[in-house]
Structures are given as C-alpha cells and as structure tokens.
Image (cartoon, helix red, strand yellow):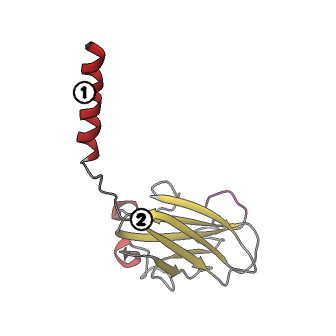
Amino acid sequence: MGKTIVFIQLQLTMVLFSSFHIKEETTYPLTVAVKDLRNSNGVVQFALYNNSNSFPDEHYEKYFRKLTAKIINGTSEITFGNLPPGKYAVNILHDEDEDGKIKKGIILPKEGIGFSNYQSIGLTNRPAFKKASFNLSGNKKIDVKIIYL
C-alpha cells in the first residue's frame, strides 16, 4: 500500500509540473566586426558592457562578456551569442602583444582601440556609455572603427 501511495504522488507531481510552461527568455546574437587594422599581429579583444558604471573600462575588468579573435588580412569579427534584449556598448583592443592590456606610451595608447558609435576620441570626445551604447532587440551586426593614436 505504501508503494502505491508513493507511485500515485509521483504521478500527480508529474501531471502538476507538466501543466506549467517555463517561459524561455528571448535572446539574440550580436556580431561585432573591425577592419583596417594596421597589421595582423596579435589578436583583437572584444569587450561587451551592459552597465553604464562599468564603461569605459581601461583595465578590462568590468565587462559583461569578453571574447578574443584572430586577425585575418587586417580584419576581425566575433559573435556574442544568447544576449538578452537591452542596452550594450562595445570596447575593442588591437592587442598586438597579446597580453590583454592596453600598451601605453606616456599617456596615449600604443595599440589600437575602438568603441561602438565612435569614429574618433580625444579630450573633448572621451568614451562614455551613453554615446557608445545601442539597443539590442533582435539579431544585430555592428562595425567598430579602430583608432590608433
């Protein structure tokens, strides 16, 4: 009799849980491309941000996701998969020495950098999440301009 009760309870539990639908969150891919790299040395580091308090991130410590890709004929491209809809910004580094850090001269970077929605940077055009960010609400591809200072 005890085994029968356990079996009935198990069957009722299965029926109860089968009536619930688990809502799957819609996600999208984001492809980021960069071209016109000055050489094919090293790799390109693509950092993705979804928080205004984490961008810009000179030391690449506050990113949401980070991927690295090879360079082929002065171009590189990656795809961040399964991203929930939202606001994002991208920061890239042409990491010529593959150390994961921006190599600097006295003040300015010696390696190429880039930010989504930026064609240039300077004292009056410093990277900010508000300007660099974009909405992701479907499959998206963006091109980021590499900047050598």
Rendered view: 142 above or below 93: below
Is disc 2 surrounded by few (<14), some (14 to 19) or many (20+) residues within 10 Å? many
Query: Secondary structure beneath disc 2?
Result: loop
* Location of residue 63 in the rendering, given as x and y in whole percent from the top left corner: 46, 58
Magenta segment, which residues? 97-104
Tag 1: residue type? Answer: Gln
Residue in the picture at 36% in, 65% down? 26
Q: Nearer the viewer, mark 2 or mark 1?
A: 1
Residue in the picture at 49% in, 59% down? 65
The label shown at residue 82 is none
Q: Is residue 60 left or right of residue 36?
A: left
Tag 2: residue type? Answer: Phe
Mark 2 vs mark 1: which is more N-terminal? Answer: 1
Answer whether residue 68 is magenta in the image: no
Q: CA distance from mark 2 to mark 1?
A: 53 Å
Residue 109: name its quadrant: bottom right
Q: Which residue is mark 1?
A: 9
* Location of residue 106 in the rendering, given as x and y in whole percent from the top left corner: 62, 67
* Location of residue 18 in the rendering, given as x and y in whole percent from the top left corner: 28, 45
Viewer-proximal residue among 94 and 78: 78
Residue 79: name its quadrant: bottom right
Screen quadrant of the N terminus: top left
Q: Which residue is mark 2?
A: 55
